[in-house]
């Protein structure tokens, strides 16, 4: 039997939501072993001078705990 944990990860990108999601997963993978899934909890944009300057995402990532 295995146990999993869920943690929250936030990331931003000037290029788009997909890029921010990829960055969040890649960064989480550098610190957490055994990533098994993720879901988007929230996404929003930062607007400066009437234009989108950043795409931000908040994800919950699941990883298996070591025995």
Image (cartoon, rainbow, N blue to C red):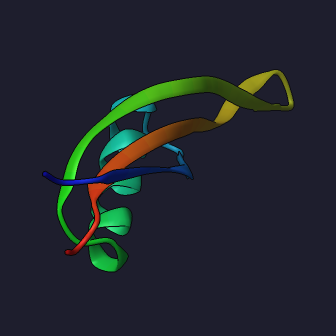
Instruction: Name the residue rendered at 46%, 26% in the picture.
Output: 40
Q: Is residue 23 above or below residue 56?
A: below
> On the rendered structure, is 50 left or right of 28?
right
Instruction: Name the residue at 60% across, 25% down.
Output: 43
Of 9 and 51, nearer the camera is 9
Q: In screen coordinates, is 24 left or right of 26?
A: right
- In percent of width and height, residue 42 lies at 61, 24
Q: Residue at x 56, y 26 (%)?
A: 41
Task: Give whichever of 62, 13 is nearer the camera.
Answer: 62
Most foreground residue, 50 or 4: 4
Tell me where residue 61 appears, x and y as whole percent: 39, 45
Q: Quadrant of residue 56?
A: top right
- The residue most toward the left is 1
Which picture quadrant has residue 19?
A: top left
- Residue drawn 43% across and 40% down? 15
Residue furthest toward the right? 49
Q: Position of residue 36 (x, y in %)?
A: 19, 46
């Amino acid at each position: 039997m295995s146990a999993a944990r869920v943690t929250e990860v936030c990331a931003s990108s000037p290029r788009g939501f997909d890029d921010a999601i990829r960055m969040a997963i890649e960064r989480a993978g550098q610190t957490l072993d055994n990533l098994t899934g993720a879901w988007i909890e929230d996404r929003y944009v930062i607007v400066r001078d009437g234009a989108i300057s950043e795409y931000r995402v908040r994800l919950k990532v699941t990883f298996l705990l070591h025995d």
